[in-house]
Image: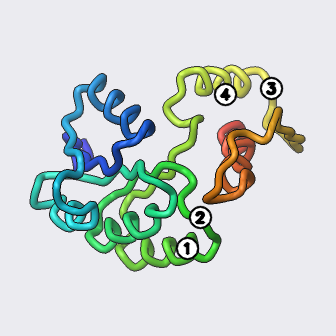
Amino acid sequence: PPKSYPPHPLVIGRGPWAKNIWATLEALKIPYTISGKITALDCISEARNRGNTHVIIATPLSTHYKLAEAAFLHSLPVFLEKPACSTWKELCQLKTAWEDSNRPRFLVDSIHLFSRGAEAAVNYYKAFIPPPMSVASSFGGLGPHREDCTGLWDYGWHPFSLLYALSV
């Protein structure tokens, strides 16, 4: 088993996505800690002392960069709700923080991850059809309006993640 087994994540966030994560962890019988009475940044700095093996961040977008950077400073693996950051500059800074922290595991969530339906579709496709040589993509709508980032920044990479899954 991996060094961090059994997992015991620190979950930061209390909104709908965090609640989905709690439900998933409970269904998998994985114990977790929810950030509590101290600030999220203090929770991250105390995570290892509290027995947490990694950090799951499901907070408003404006907090993603600071929280992930703090986790990296403590060499904690991070599972981050998408999008990772609100700007390209923050994303580049986050990449530097990750590289400077001995590169702990880092995953940005996508609706395609851990989806049995998406996994079955990809496996079926790969069994019968050769890898794609080109792809055209369109969206059915503009999605929910967000004030904190553009639709392309939040939703535009879904076709790319599916393309990657189909081509490896």
Q: Amino acid at mark 4?
A: Val
Q: Quadrant of residue 106?
A: bottom left
Q: Amino acid at mark 1?
A: Glu
Disc with the residue nearer the chain's start (1 vs 3):
1
Residue denoted by label 2 = 86
- On the rendered structure, is 66 left or right of 12? right
Marks 3 and 4, Cα distance to the nearest angstrom? 10 Å
**Measured along the vertical axis of the image, is residue 3 above or below residue 137?**
below
Measured as percent of width and height from the top left, residue 143 is found at 72, 39
Residue denoted by label 1 = 90
Measured as percent of width and height from the top left, residue 167 is found at 72, 41
SS class, disc 3: loop
Q: Is residue 26 visible?
A: yes
Marks 1 and 3, Cα distance to the nearest angstrom? 38 Å
SS class, disc 2: loop
CB contact under 8 Å: marks 3 and 4: no
CB contact under 8 Å: marks 1 and 3: no
Closer to the eye: label 3 or 4: 4
Q: Residue at x 23, y 51 (%)?
A: 35
- On the rendered structure, is 118 left or right of 84? right
Question: Which of the two residues, 60 or 90, is positioned nearer the viewer here?
Answer: 60
SS class, disc 1: helix
Residue 129 is marked as 3
Disc with the residue nearer the chain's start (1 vs 4):
1
Q: Amino acid at mark 3?
A: Ile
Residue denoted by label 4 = 122
Disc with the residue nearer the chain's start (4 vs 2):
2
